[in-house]
Amino acid sequence: MTSATKPPPDWLRRARPEPTPGRSPRHAVPFLLPALLVLGALVVYPLLYSLVRSFFDRSGEEFVGLGNYVDLFTDARTLTAFRNNVIWVVVAPAAVTGLGLVLAVLTERIRWATAFRLVLFVPMAISLFASGIIFRLVYEEDPDQGIVNAVAVGMHDVFSTPSSYPGARPREGAQLTPTADGYVTASKHRAGEMVTVPLVGFPPQQAPEQAEPVGSPAAVAGELRGVVWLDVSAAGTSGKADPGERGMPGVTVEAVADGAVVARTMTGSDGVFTFPDLVGRDITLRLPADNFSLPFRGLTWLGPSLITPVIISSWIWIMTGFAITFIAAGLSAIPRDALEAARVDGATEWQVFRRVTVPLLAPVLLVVFVTLVINVLKIFELVFVIAPGSVQEEANVLALQMWQVSFGSGGDQGAGSALAVLLFLLVAPAMLFNIRRFRREQT
């Protein structure tokens, strides 16, 4: 055999191993090229363009350097958005991860655990925009439309009886003065007098069924009498009880002397009330405000003080299914021997959960938490849809601020690009952390 055909020595073959079939970079490039082109067009190019654009002014013609970044940290709206993002990062991911962990553990041993988790995962199948519309209606202030206020009003009315005549008030010229405690007569009265109290501002069709035609009591010595009625007859005389007008039953009337309530009574079905045993005393009559207070209509959930907690609660409801799914998969991979060994050693279920289950689930919980942090930093649709325009500034977040500055009323794409770069710098560490963990798990 000639030297030209002599096989290479063993040490050379070991130093230059044969390439593994199917792993040649030249073979992989044609398959990766379409994905690389799409990635470059949709991710790399916009990122580089935003970075360059952030150094120019509104028109994109004048170079301003770091001017846009300086403006970010001096603009009140941007600072509000940054504060709200901090609240989101601190509260929302921890709440979803904790709630997902508890529900995943509690439903692990029940037969219908899969169905339960499926129901909780369904909100993930709905777009955040559609979910925002749903929650905008759920938290509507009108209890006839918003289910939260409908429940709140129902619970309130169970424990607190609503007023009988909300919004009613004395007719002009009725000699009643409004105070913090209700309406009081401008002059003092004594036993033997008869006081008329005409009221307006209440729909006659909503009067109680037991309301009868207004009474006409006569003055009686030794008694202070009066009548309260709804003075709304168009054909009658203002301030006088006319045919067809009805009394207002159930109105509380107080007799006040020297600043103290000395007697209290309630009007009858014809609106007449009577105070006996007040001879020789100067009495001021008072109709307490409880008679006319407006009914409880719930809370202003979409107001400035509650809008951010409301949106966070909506996001928690949507994302809990995501956390349950991942944590349940982690639970299924935990060695049952470790759990049973802890129980055999006398550990309670709480101790098993705290000292065995949670430590073994720590890698999964960390991945879920970091993923939710990334999601929270980019939150946009829920805030845009749920928050009304009047309070959108109080609920503002960085992603929404970026959109408003770039394409909304601001129209400043230089400042918007600076916000986009800032948002990327906030998201990038969490993304890199997750990528490193995935690579470590694969090795």
Image: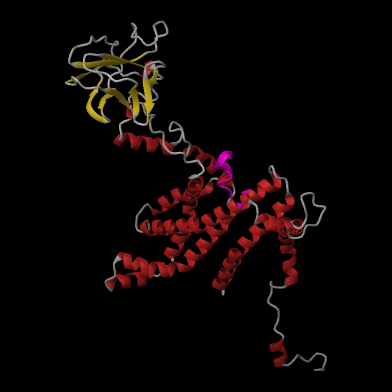
Asked if the magenta segment contains residue 39, the reply would be no
Q: Is residue 127 visible?
A: no
Q: Position of residue 4 (x, y in %)?
A: 83, 91
Q: Which residue is drawn at 68% across and 48% down?
A: 405
Quick check: 91 left or right of 199? right
* Residue in front for this viewpoint, 244 or 429: 244
Q: 385 or 354, which lies in front?
A: 385
Q: Residue 386 or 157: which is nearer the viewer?
A: 157
Displayed quadrant of residue 429: bottom right
Percent from the top left, x then y, of residue 367?
A: 52, 64
Name the image quarter holding the C terminus.
Answer: bottom right
Describe residue 139's horizontal placement relative to residue 378 as left or right: left
Report the residue at 72% width, 61% height from top. 36
Give the left or right position of residue 163, taking residue 364 as reference: left
Q: In which quarter of the image is residue 254?
A: top left
Q: Please tell me whether residue 89 is drawn above or below residue 172 in the rendered image.
A: below
Residue under the image location 34 percent in, 68 percent down: 352
* Residue 160 horizontal/vertical position (percent): 31, 34
Above or below, 244 relative to 413: above
* Magenta segment boundaries in residue numbering: 384-400
Residue 432 lies, in percent from the top left, at 61, 67
Q: Residue 357, located in which quarter of the rendered image?
A: bottom left
Magenta span has 389?
yes
Tell me the quadrant of the picture where the N terminus can be found: bottom right
Answer yes or no: is residue 404 visible.
Answer: yes
Report whether 178 appears left or right of 316: left
